[in-house]
RNA sequence: GGAGUGGUAGUUCAGUUGGUUAGAACGCUGGCCUGUCAAGCCAGAGGUCGCGGGUUCAAGUCCCGUCCGCUCCGCCA
């Protein structure tokens, strides 16, 4: 194809097709850059072929043309900046296949047209090489994925798209049933129950590259429909599963980027991640751990924000930056407080340790010299350090400090795009308490098995039960998560009831599943990886929109098709649906 | 639901303290040009300043509302 011609092709008669990228007209001779998805090649049209030249004179950017001619060397006019720069096609025949309107933005890399315009004319945006490349990569990776897992004895199996709405988890997209007016299917948030049923059905190892749907608000790394690499295995320990996934990740990173992933991947408990980095998906491209100063400070300071934190049984968390000299007063007054405020923190206190070991900054006056020395020793920091303090309820203090850590790391140039920090986060709590609903909710999902040594705490202290759940984190992005599942119907029923589901709820929502568990269920577990997020990482994209061909806006609309949209009354009548008055 | 940010020519942007005819680059149209490849040179066309209201002698600029894009919080088992 057009981008692949080289010096070795000289002398060939070729026919090429493509889009006019650019033309350069020099009176007698005319050059056309003809683009397809592989790149572009230069066509030369001369006046001594008057028909060719006359047609060439009329073409405009983005017209689709076909050219037949001879591949020739450019001689002394080689352009080494272009892959096909050694050769050009001396055109004997030229045909216009399709004319084009002037596009609303230029089709070339580095043109940052507005996102809304790009989405409206998505088919034009996709012609741009840098975007086009992402989809070739996408195809390569799905191909590689199928090979890897089928080579490991997985069956690629399909699950329904029209399925059953279940409580728990994300909001479902609903699909009304025409045959059963007033009843609805739901689009799957993930094929969770079906893949477990495959295990009960004896399929042993299941894989699917499947679309999932969640009706929740979007983010740069969250679209309402997304692609998941879904896996489930019977008779497997989580260590075996991790090993298999590590082999997969290593192969993908090796083949796509030529990067050797250090195996085994580091493992860290949820509790450790929260304590040390303030979040459950720490970016370990740099270390810079947080420090919990709550106990050291208790009763030993009058600093108002700290005292307030003690009053609400809060936490005083510190980000020690060993060399904080590059941060300015403006960063301390504006940047850090703004970032922390996004996570609800009311402020960021700070202290600098001077060359002589003396402290300056907002907290300096309120701490005794003895306490300062203890803190510096505990945080292992000395002269030149900058300490950022957030005092608030624990969840806020952690989230704010985690954010500050990333902002500081970024400013210090520690987030290299060619560094890859893989991490398994393990031992998540089984449940977290939902203050709004006044009940326990599953942190992963309700089919996750508690750790076997925590089973007896289900009745006595659900909040302390740890789950056999794990997330795979890469550079601070949650690439996927999974768990060893419950394979015992009584444990499953107990978990459902802990989540506040009545017997009747369990019967109507999950009856088939609890029944199935009773017919000989193998121990099993699995994981789901976000394929789009993985591509985003591998392609170096800033947004999921750059690796999804036809993505939605942050308000979940498609600007190209203008969906969602109203439907005819007739359609609604057939479905037995009446719209509520707004 | 909330916070931030942006919306000016086809595109990307500039537009001072509210003040005369809203500019630049790229693109587009026409012309010249036989070695360009981010081609070059000459000429030209192109504007509902997102939309609606308000303040003012005067609004792209100030105020209120609203729509849309993006980022984040909530939400996302």
Image (cartoon, rainbow, N blue to C red):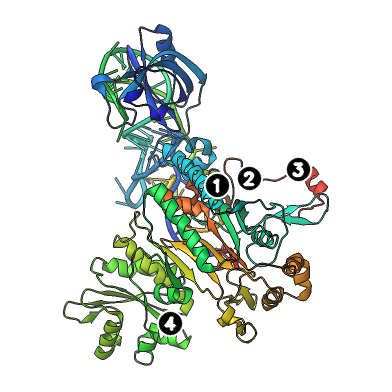
The alpha-carbon separation of the residues under discs 4 and 3 comes to 56 Å
Give the spatial CA distance, label 2 vs label 1: 11 Å
| Residues tagged 2 and 3 counted as in contact (Cβ below 8 A) | no
Image height of A430 relative to A197, above or below: below
Q: CA distance from mark 4 to mark 2?
A: 46 Å
Q: Which residue is mark 3?
A: A568
Q: Are marks 1 and 4 on the same chain?
A: yes
Q: Chain of mark 3?
A: A
Residue where numbered disc 4 is placed: A315
Which chain is indicated by disc 4?
A: A
4 or 3: mark nearer the eye = 4
Count of labels in the image? 4
Judge the density around disc 3: few (<14), some (14-19), many (≥20) Cα neighbours within 10 Å: few
Residue A516: name its quadrant. Answer: bottom right
Is residue A79 found left or right of A526 in the rendered image?
A: left
Residue position marked by numbered label 2 in the rendering? A563
Asked whether the residues under the numbered discs 1 and 4 touch, taking CB atoms below 8 Å apart as contact, a structural biologist would say: no
The location of residue A557, given as percent across then percent down, is: 59, 48
Please tell me if label 2 and label 3 are on a single chain: yes
Which type of secondary structure does the marked residue at label 1 adopt?
loop
Q: Which mark is residue A551?
A: 1
The residue closer to the viewer here, B64 or B33, is B33
């Amino acid at each position: 194809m057009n981008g692949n011609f080289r010096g070795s092709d000289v002398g060939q008669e070729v026919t090429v097709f493509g889009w006019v990228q650019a033309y350069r007209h020099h009176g007698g001779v005319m050059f056309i850059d003809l683009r397809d998805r592989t790149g572009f090649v230069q066509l030369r049209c001369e006046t001594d072929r008057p028909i060719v030249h006359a047609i060439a004179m009329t073409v405009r950017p983005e017209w689709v043309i076909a050219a037949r001619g001879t591949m020739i060397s450019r001689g002394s006019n080689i352009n080494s900046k272009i892959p096909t720069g050694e050769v050009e096609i001396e055109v004997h025949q030229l045909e216009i296949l399709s004319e084009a309107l002037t596009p609303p933005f230029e089709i070339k890399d580095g043109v940052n047209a507005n996102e809304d315009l790009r989405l409206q004319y998505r088919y034009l945006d996709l012609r741009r090489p840098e975007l086009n490349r992402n989809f070739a990569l996408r195809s390569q990776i799905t191909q590689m994925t199928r090979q890897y897992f089928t080579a490991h004895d997985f069956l690629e199996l399909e699950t329904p798209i029209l399925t059953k709405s279940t409580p728990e988890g994300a909001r479902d997209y609903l699909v009304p049933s025409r045959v059963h007016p007033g009843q609805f299917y739901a689009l799957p948030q993930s094929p969770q129950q079906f893949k477990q049923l495959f295990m009960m059905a004896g399929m042993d190892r299941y894989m699917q590259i499947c679309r999932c749907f969640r009706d929740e608000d979007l983010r740069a790394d969250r679209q309402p429909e997304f692609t998941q690499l879904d896996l489930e295995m019977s008779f497997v320990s989580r260590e075996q599963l991790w090993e298999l996934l590590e082999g997969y990740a290593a192969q993908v990173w090796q083949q796509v980027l030529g990067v050797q992933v250090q195996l085994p991947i580091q493992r860290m408990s949820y509790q450790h991640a929260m304590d040390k980095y303030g979040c459950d998906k720490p970016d370990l491209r740099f270390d810079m751990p947080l420090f919990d100063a709550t106990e050291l400070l208790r009763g030993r300071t009058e600093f108002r924000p700290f005292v307030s934190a003690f009053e609400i049984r809060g936490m005083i968390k510190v980000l020690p930056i060993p060399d904080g000299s590059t941060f300015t007063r403006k960063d301390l007054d504006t940047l850090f407080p703004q970032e922390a405020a996004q996570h609800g923190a009311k402020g960021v206190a700070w202290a600098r340790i001077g060359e002589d070991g003396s402290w300056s900054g907002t907290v300096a006056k309120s701490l005794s010299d003895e306490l300062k020395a203890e803190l510096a020793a505990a945080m292992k920091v000395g002269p030149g350090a900058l300490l950022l303090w957030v005092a608030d309820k624990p969840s806020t203090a952690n989230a704010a400090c985690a954010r500050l850590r990333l902002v500081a790391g970024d400013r210090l140039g520690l987030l290299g795009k060619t560094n890859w920090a893989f991490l398994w986060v393990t031992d998540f709590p089984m449940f977290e308490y939902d203050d709004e609903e006044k009940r326990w909710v599953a942190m992963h999902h309700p089919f996750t098995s508690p750790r076997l040594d925590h089973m007896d705490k289900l009745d006595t202290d659900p909040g302390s039960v740890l789950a056999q759940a794990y997330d795979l984190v890469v550079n601070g992005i949650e690439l996927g998560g999974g768990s060893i599942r419950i394979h015992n119907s009584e444990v499953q029923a107990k978990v459902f009831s802990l989540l506040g589901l009545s017997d009747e709820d369990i019967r109507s929502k999950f009856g088939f599943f609890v029944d199935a568990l009773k017919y000989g269920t193998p121990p099993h577990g699995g994981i789901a990886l976000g394929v789009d997020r993985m591509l985003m990482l591998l392609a170096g994209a800033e947004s999921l929109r750059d690796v999804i061909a036809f993505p939605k806006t942050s308000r979940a609309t498609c600007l190209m098709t203008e969906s969602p949209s109203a439907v005819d009354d007739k359609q609604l009548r057939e479905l037995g649906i009446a719209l509520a008055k707004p």
